[in-house]
Amino acid sequence: MSNEIASHYSPGNLGAAIEAGLKVVTGNTRPATIDDLAPVDEFHIGSRAASVHLFDQLGLTSADIVLDVGAGIGGSSRFVAKNYGCKVTGIDLTPEFSEVGNSLNEKFGLSDLVSIQQGSALEMPFEDDSFSVVYMMHVGMNISDKAALYSEIRRVLKPGGKFAVYDVLKGSNPAALEFPVPWATEPSSSFLATVDQMRELLTNAGFEIDVVEDRIEFAVEFFKGLTPPAGGPPPIGLHLIIGKDTPIKIKNMVDNINNDLCGPWELIAH
């Protein structure tokens, strides 16, 4: 299953595609910035606005040592490091993501604050009590053994540390999801929990839950505000990761949300 998930997110030419896209965005007349990367870096519903909403609740300071679980190419890690001054370690299952992410860290002068390791969130290569804050954004949908996931996160989190989740959860409609979606081509690699299951899982792992927020209406409004680009996909965008099926995957996800089959939620615990 881990190989299936890693291959789902590995287009094979991502670094070159991003570099080519940045040249178009900047017109080769100015240095690229991490804001230029945002359309591909922010691989979650709501993009940058969702990141700001989650991270601003955590009271992050430069003293925090942060872990980004399922870091992808490190977009959220770089955003946290640049805007809050934290040192961030990311871990991701997909080798291409960690390789491209570290290359981008170097490109944008953030290698001293951000590093991304390839590995499984279920067996992380970190010591106990290593991080003051752990977060994951749109990751749990691909992990079936959530009890093991949250137990492992609890292991590496310092006592009193904060854990934030922004994930797509199962809605109240019992019908099956429409596939493909951005996180899974087929049902065999999609594992959505309900919000009640999430409460139980986190509590059983030793967390006390501080915030549970439904972000579904935010998602609906976000998608209403998007307009299909004229003349094909933009130089930098999620299609570089999701691939040629991006339009149908996004459409299915939006339809699933509108039909209450799934939707994004935030949970913050300690």
Image (spheres, rainbow, N blue to C red):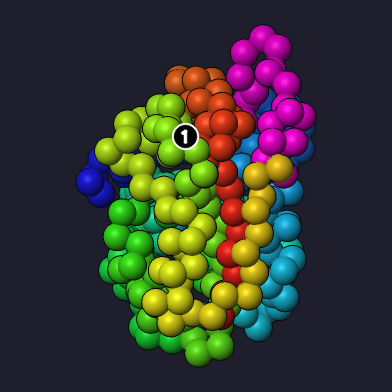
- Judged by its main secondary structure, the magenta piece is loop
Which residue appears at 38% of the width and 81% of the height? 155
In the picture of the structure, the residue carrying the numbered disc 1 is 182
Which residue appears at 35% of the width and 62% of the height? 146
Residue 17 can be seen, yes or no: no
User: In the rendering, at what x and y percent does residue 34 appear?
Assistant: 68, 48
User: In the rendering, at what x and y percent does residue 41 appear?
Assistant: 59, 44
Vertical position of residue 226 compared to residue 76: above or below? above
Which residue appears at 58% of the width and 48% of the height? 264
**Front residue of 16 and 249:** 249
User: In the rendering, at what x and y percent does residue 114 appear?
Assistant: 55, 65
For residue 233, side relative to residue 203 (left or right): right
Vertical position of residue 60 compared to residue 219: above or below? below
Residue density around tag 1, few if under 14, some if 14–19, many if 20 or more, within 10 Å? many
Residue 148 can be seen, yes or no: yes
Q: What stretch is highlighted in magenta?
A: 218-237
Give the amino acid at mark 1.
Pro
Q: Is mark 1 on a helix, strand or loop?
A: loop
